[in-house]
Amino acid sequence: MGPDLADGFLETGLVTPQRMRVIDTNAMALGVTELQLMESAGRGLADHVLASGPDHVLILCGKGNNGGDGMVAARHLSRHARTDVAYLDAGKRSGACDHQLAALRHARIPLLPFANRDDLKALEPLFARADIIVDCLLGTGAGGAVREPLKTCVAMANATKARIIAADIPTPGMRSDAIIAFHRAKIAGSTVADIGIPVEAECFTGPGELTLLPPRRKTGHKGVGGHVLIIGGGPYQGAPYLAGLGALRAGADIVRIASPVFEPIPDLIYERLDGKAIGPEHTERLIGLVEKADVVVCGNGLGTESHAVVTAIAPHCKKAVFDADALRLPLPKAKGETIYTPHAGEFARITGVTLPEDTIGKARVAKQAGLPGTVILKGHIDIITDGKQVRFNRTGDPAMTVGGTGDVLAGIAGALLCQLPAFEAACLAAYVNGRAGEAAVACSGGGLLASDLVGRIPQVLYGKRIRNGA
């Protein structure tokens, strides 16, 4: 799939810091280490600086990975021009930045630490002599106003006649004559340096998607994780409960099951619907429940006789995930963001299009289908698209063909949709569901139950997160 991924599926244009963090983390999961990425970035930065033919370069380094990029650049520059490194020596540095500083201590490069304004004032002659200043003070992870001593550092650099080259993004308030962006531009007018990130780090889901999930605040209260309503059951009694447990394990605080079928699971709130199937007589009550929920997950175990109810309640949903038997024409749509989770047969049912066999062909068809929301097209490799973006998910195991794993996926997507935009929620849900399945199979060795996935979801979602330095 490698070469074809760049043809129509590789993102272009400016990249947000959040998305870049996902890509970096995915690249590291693919075996490209943080130090390799930093070495490539620093080398690319040095090459652009050298193109100006400098005599005296001053590199200003902060405590994060942006500072580490500058320290790498210093090693490469020092063979060709007088190079000084002034670095912030207050607070904790990122591990990669600390590694690069240790390497610089063994090089014949002047290292000039500063912790306050007085330290910087002593460096004024150095600022005045530099013909190029490289700004590596703050990277894409930084936020807020620049404080001392960086505020003074910015003012001193701005006061010089030197050409200022920013690494990735300029420090707030710092003028820039050129911006060298790593991998992709973060702001307009940047020159991009390729740092060797694989195409797969952008096109496939990975552990980087976990960095999008907001952390729980200590001051949080019941309900802050979201209120999910599951509507389903009747012909297939277990499906809505698997979806509900998936939603709970993925972080939803309150999960209600509106169904004609009761399963004694105390963690789920049961909203009893009389009869053997959901029918028009339940519409008014369901609308009341729907309007109280942050996200509705609908269709699990519903059967074929309830679609009129689905289409009646859909416009009242703030956000929704439509799965299984809800995937019929007319296609329901929430008034807010909507996720659809079809397999190939259900996709053909709602679009009239039979998917090709190859994954790239399927992705092109799914992207162009014009469905009014985000689609998780389930398969050996899942395809996630909102009609503009496409991601592929290859987590999972062949044993996950067992019934119910799709219901768990729908529940996970519903919980994540409480916290994230639809496309990001869908990508993360597909990744987590597959990883949970892999973990369950590794434990059991076979004979997988869909319920086996449920207990593995929190470990995948919350067990370990990779955080990059600034």
Image (tube, rainbow, N blue to C red):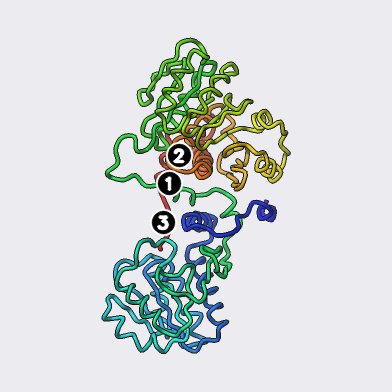
Q: Mark number for residue 416?
A: 2
**Side of 379 where 335 appears, left or right:** left
Measured as percent of width and height from the top left, residue 297 is found at 49, 29
Question: Circle 3 — which element?
Answer: loop
CB atoms of marks 1 and 2 within 8 Å: yes
- Residue at (54, 36) in percent of width and height: 339
Q: Quadrant of the C terminus?
A: bottom left
**Side of 101 where 120 appears, left or right:** left
Q: Amino acid at mark 2?
A: Leu
Q: Mark number for residue 466?
A: none
Residue 452 in view in this figure: no
Is residue 271 shown above or below 415?
above
Q: Camera-side residue: 220 or 96? A: 220
Q: Residues within 10 Å of mark 1 (few under 14, many from 20)?
A: some
Among numbered discs 3 and 2, the one appearing first in the sequence: 2
- Circle 3 residue: 467
**Side of 60 where 384 appears, left or right:** right
Q: Camera-side residue: 66 or 400? A: 66
CB atoms of marks 1 and 3 within 8 Å: no
Q: Residues within 10 Å of mark 2 (few under 14, many from 20)?
A: many
Q: Amino acid at mark 1?
A: Leu
Question: Circle 2 — which element?
Answer: helix
Image mark count: 3
- Circle 1 residue: 213
Measured as percent of width and height from the top left, residue 182 is found at 53, 66
Is residue 102 shown above or below 256?
below
